């Protein structure tokens, strides 16, 4: 197991941001943390990346406590934050070259150029970051993670604010990182993103994990069929159970469909409140 998170808790004053959270991430796995804003996803990332210290619990990377081995941990991880933390006055190449120097990566020019080409940014190699579109800036942030040599990459809402086409491009970049042998912890509130990318997901609400499994298993457990009635959605194990309920209640103006992970998220949060 690459990352082990055991009973981690973090408070800020009287506010409990993360409450007794446990999960693990295997090598080459994309693991998703789902939840609404304020659920505790970003605080979890901060603790896992050593930017915040847990009040209690343990976090192990390759079997080593990340608080005791902070310097080694930071060499083995990379963070793609939701904030555009790039030097806008620098060129794309310069941003990546300076990052490589800070990571202690020698002879990085070929690696950088290969990564820029892989991400379809060759024409923007010498362009100032400040002139790039939002999607292109996200690619540069992804490129930093790709050249880092990190085993584990934390991606905190990497597609927030992007249009659907650019989001799809980011998804393929994340898949590329996985195919390169990286493990990824992805936080998102886009359930279609989690369904497409993640082998397993954990749903967070008010600092706690309320459900965790593969996306399909979570859907199957919640109910494979959904019935939309006005502003409500009811979940059922199979179509027969849904039809029986519709007939019993003499429903009209309803819609029967297959359950999506978004329905599971809403249902899980409802149970947690």
Image: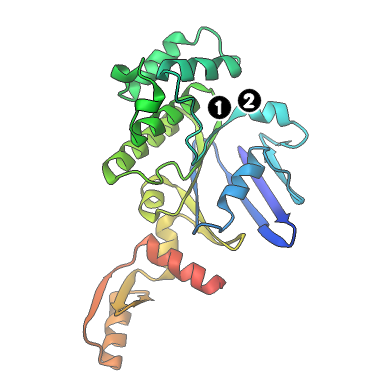
Vertical placement of residue 269 versus 159, above or below? below
Which residue is the extreme one toward the left? Answer: 253
Q: Residue at x 40, y 53 (%)?
A: 190
What element does badge 2 sit on? helix
What element does badge 1 sit on? loop
Vertical placement of residue 76 versus 224, above or below? above
| Quarter of the N terminus within the rendering | top right
Is 68 situated left or right of 105 in this image? right
> Percent x, y for residue 263?
39, 67
* Res. 64 mark: none
> Percent x, y for residue 212?
53, 58
Q: Nearer the viewer, residue 134 or 21?
A: 134
Vertical placement of residue 229 versus 45, above or below? below
Q: Residues within 10 Å of mark 1 (few under 14, many from 20)?
A: some
| Quarter of the C terminus within the rendering | bottom right
Pointer 2 or 1: first along the chain: 2
Is 36 situated left or right of 225 in this image? right
* Res. 150 mark: 1
Q: Nearer the viewer, residue 50 or 21?
A: 50
Q: Residue at x 37, y 75 (%)?
A: 235
Colour setting: rainbow
Distance between the alpha carbons at the discs numbered 2 and 1? 7 Å
- Image quadrant assignment for residue 173: top left
Q: Residue at x 31, y 17 (%)?
A: 122
Are the two marked residues, 2 and 1, in contact with CB atoms closer than 8 angstroms? yes
Q: Which residue is mark 2?
A: 75
Is 21 situated left or right of 55 in this image? left
> Percent x, y for residue 225?
32, 71
Q: Residues within 10 Å of mark 2 (few under 14, many from 20)?
A: some
């Amino acid at each position: 197991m690459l990352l082990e998170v055991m009973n981690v808790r973090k408070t800020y004053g009287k506010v409990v941001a993360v409450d007794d959270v446990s999960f693990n991430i295997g090598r080459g796995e994309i693991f998703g943390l789902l939840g609404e804003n304020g659920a505790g996803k970003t605080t979890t990332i901060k603790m896992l990346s050593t930017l915040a210290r847990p009040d209690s619990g343990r976090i192990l990377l390759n079997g080593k406590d990340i608080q005791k081995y902070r310097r080694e941990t930071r060499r083995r991880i990379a963070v793609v934050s939701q904030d555009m933390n790039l030097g806008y006055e620098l060129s794309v190449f310069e941003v990546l070259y300076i990052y490589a120097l800070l990571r202690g990566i020698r002879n990085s020019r070929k690696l950088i150029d290969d990564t820029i080409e892989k991400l379809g940014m060759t024409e923007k190699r010498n362009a100032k970051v400040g002139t790039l579109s939002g999607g292109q800036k996200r690619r540069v942030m992804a490129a930093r993670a790709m050249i880092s040599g990190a085993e584990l990459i934390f991606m905190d809402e990497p597609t927030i604010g992007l249009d659907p086409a650019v989001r799809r491009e980011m998804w393929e970049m994340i898949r590329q990182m996985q195919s390169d042998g990286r493990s990824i912890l992805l936080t998102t509130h886009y359930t279609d993103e989690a369904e497409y990318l993640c082998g397993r997901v954990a749903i967070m609400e008010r600092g706690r994990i309320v459900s965790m499994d593969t996306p399909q298993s979570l859907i199957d457990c919640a109910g494979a069929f959904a019935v939309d009635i006005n502003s409500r959605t009811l979940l059922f194990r199979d179509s027969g159970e849904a039809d029986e309920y519709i007939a019993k209640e003499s429903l009209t103006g309803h819609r029967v469909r297959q359950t999506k992970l978004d329905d599971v998220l809403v249902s899980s949060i409802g149970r947690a409140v």
